[in-house]
Image (tube, grey):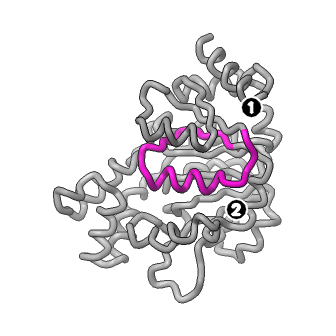
Amino acid sequence: MIVRAALAEAEARADRQSAPSALWGELAAGRIVPYLGPGLLALAGAPIPLTPRDLALALHARAPVSGRLRGLLWATAQFIESRRHRKTLTALMADIFRAPTAPTAFHRQLAGLDVPLIIDTWYDGALRTALIESGRSDWGELQGVTRAGQYRDVWTKAYDASGTEVDPARAADWTTVIYKPHGAVVPAANFLVSDSDYVEILTEIDIQSPVPEVVKERRRGRSFLFLGARFDDQMLRIFARQIAKRAGNGHLAVLERARLTRNETRFLHEVGIEVIDCPLDCALAAFAGD
C-alpha cells in the first residue's frame, strides 16, 4: 500500500491518473519513454559490475591503475587506453561483460510492447536478449561508438535485430528503437568509457549533434520514466539531461529519496523529474498490477 501510495502521489503531481496501472498504460501506449539504468539488472543478480565505481574496480583488477584513479571509471579507462592501447581497453571491457546477462521480468514485459523508443544506458545485452526471445524482428539498436580509430564523422552505429550493422537511416522504419548512448558488449563491443571517448561528445552534446535524429524525433512530446538509473556521477547527469532535452514534461524516476546525494536532488529538480519514492522491485510490481 505504501508503494502504491507513492506511485499515486507522483502521478498526481505529474497530472496523471492516480492508479499505477495508468502509468503502465501510458508506457505501453508509447507516451512515456523508459530510460533504463544498471540498477534494473540487480533484480536478476546480474554477474557484472552495476555502477561506474564497480566497473572501474573491475578494470583495475585486470590492469592496475594508480591509487588516485582507483574507483573513477572514466579516468581508469583513459589510463588503460593511454598506457596499454585502445584494443586492450576494449578487450578488457568485453571480458567484463562477456557473461550473458539474463533479462529481468521487466525487460521481457518491455520487449512485448511496441514502444517507439527505449533508452538503455549500461553496457550489457539483457534487453537485446529479451527482444530476441520475444520473436520480434521490427526493432534495432543505435549504439554510441568511440571515435578512436574512426576515419569518418560518426557518433553512433546501427544494428538490426539480427545484430547486423546497417545504415542508421534504417532506424526510422523500426517499430522500436533502442538507444544505447554508451555502447554495448553485443553485437560488436562498442564502448564509450574513457575520458578521450567523451571529449568531442561533451563539446557537441549541448547542441545535440551526438544524439541520433530518430531519438530526437521520438522523444518529442513524450516524458521519461527513469528505472534503475542513478545520477550520482557528472557524466550520467550530463547524458540524462541531454537525452531528455526538448522532450515533453512530467518526467518520473523510481528512486529511494533517502539514498539520494545532494547533487542528485539538485539535478532532479533542475530537469523537472518527480521522484517515485520506493524500491525499484516494488514499483515494477505495482506498475504491472502484481
Give the secondary structure at mark 2. Answer: strand
**Which of the image's four quarters has the C terminus?**
top right
Q: Position of residue 123 (x, y in %)?
A: 49, 56
Tell me: 44 left or right of 215: left
Q: Position of residue 63 (x, y in %)?
A: 23, 64
User: Disc 1 vs disc 2: which is toward the camera?
Assistant: 1
Residue 140: mark: 2
Q: Amino acid at mark 2?
A: Gly
Q: Position of residue 91 (x, y in %)?
A: 37, 69
For the point 58% across and 45% down, which residue is it? 36
Tell me: 159 left or right of 137: left
Q: Give the extent of the magenta segment.
A: 224-249
Work out whether 41 lies above or below 126: above
Structural distance between the alpha carbons of marks 1 and 2: 23 Å
Name the residue that disc number 1 marks. Answer: 24
Indicate which disc, 1 or 2, sits on the residue closer to the N terminus: 1
Question: In the image shown, does 184 or 254 lie closer to the viewer?
Answer: 254
**Which of the image's four quarters has the N terminus?**
top right
Magenta stretch holds residue 232? yes
> Are the residues at dot 1 and dot 2 in contact (C-beta closer than 8 Å)?
no
Give the secondary structure at mark 1. Answer: helix
Q: Label 1 crowding class (10 Å Cα cut-off): few <14, some 14-19, many 20+? A: some
For the point 38% across and 67% down, which residue is it? 195
For the point 54% across and 29% down, which residue is it? 280
